[in-house]
């Protein structure tokens, strides 16, 4: 199943922010910054990636239902969802 990229603009933006946050974590490690600050930023990156993944799956579910896409069955969608858990 191919997703409609126009519906995923907010997800793309979220992933770009996460990319910037991850670069900041790398920089913080190289600079020897405080462990608490690094872990806080890393948690933010992780949460952003999780939310992006869930948004992608939700969009896929919606498109499967409205378009009756036979390329993804319930089991396939469940596996995708659980891969983020």
Image (cartoon, helix red, strand yellow):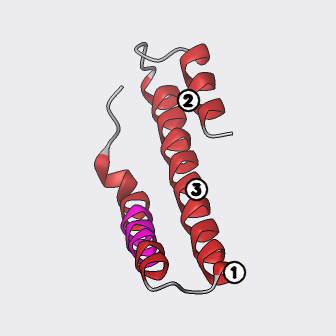
Q: Nearer the viewer, residue 21 or 26?
A: 26
Mark nearest the camera among 1 and 3 is 1
Q: Nearer the viewer, mark 1 or mark 2?
A: 1
| 76 relative to 82, above or below | above
Q: Which residue occupies 48% across, 81% down?
A: 28
Task: Tell me the quarter of the picture where residue 42 sits.
Answer: bottom right
Q: Residues within 10 Å of mark 2 (few under 14, many from 20)?
A: some
Depth check: give the residue in front, 77 or 49: 49
Q: Secondary structure at mark 3?
A: helix
Residue at left 38%, top 52%? 7
Verify CB contact (< 8 Å) between mark 2 and mark 3: no
Q: Which residues are magenta?
A: 14-24
Q: Which mark is residue 36?
A: 1
| Percent of width and height locating residue 43 | 64, 67
Disc 3 crowd rating (10 Å Cα; few below 14, some 14-19, many 20+) is some
Q: Which residue is mark 2?
A: 80
Camera-side residue of 66 and 18:
18
Give how far across and how far down residue 74 sits, in percent. Answer: 60, 17
**Quadrant of residue 34 within the rendered picture:** bottom right
The stretch drawn in magenta includes residue 15: yes
> Percent x, y for residue 67?
42, 26
Tell me, for residue 51, which label it has, or none: 3
Relative vertical location of residue 51 with respect to residue 39 in this rendering, above or below = above
**Mark 1: which secondary structure?**
helix
Which residue does the image show at 53% across and 14% down from the upper left? 73
- The mark that comes first in sequence, 1 or 3, is 1
Separation of marks 1 and 3 at Cα, in angstroms: 23 Å
- The tag earlier along the polypeptide, 2 or 3, is 3
């Amino acid at each position: 199943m191919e997703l409609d990229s126009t519906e995923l603009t907010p997800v793309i933006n979220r992933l770009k922010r996460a990319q910037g946050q991850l670069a900041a974590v790398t920089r913080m490690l190289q600079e020897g910054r405080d462990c608490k600050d690094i872990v806080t930023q890393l948690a933010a990156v992780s949460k952003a990636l999780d939310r992006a993944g869930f948004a992608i799956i939700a969009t896929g579910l919606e498109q499967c239902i409205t378009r009756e896409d036979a390329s993804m069955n319930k089991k396939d969608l469940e596996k995708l969802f659980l891969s983020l858990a």
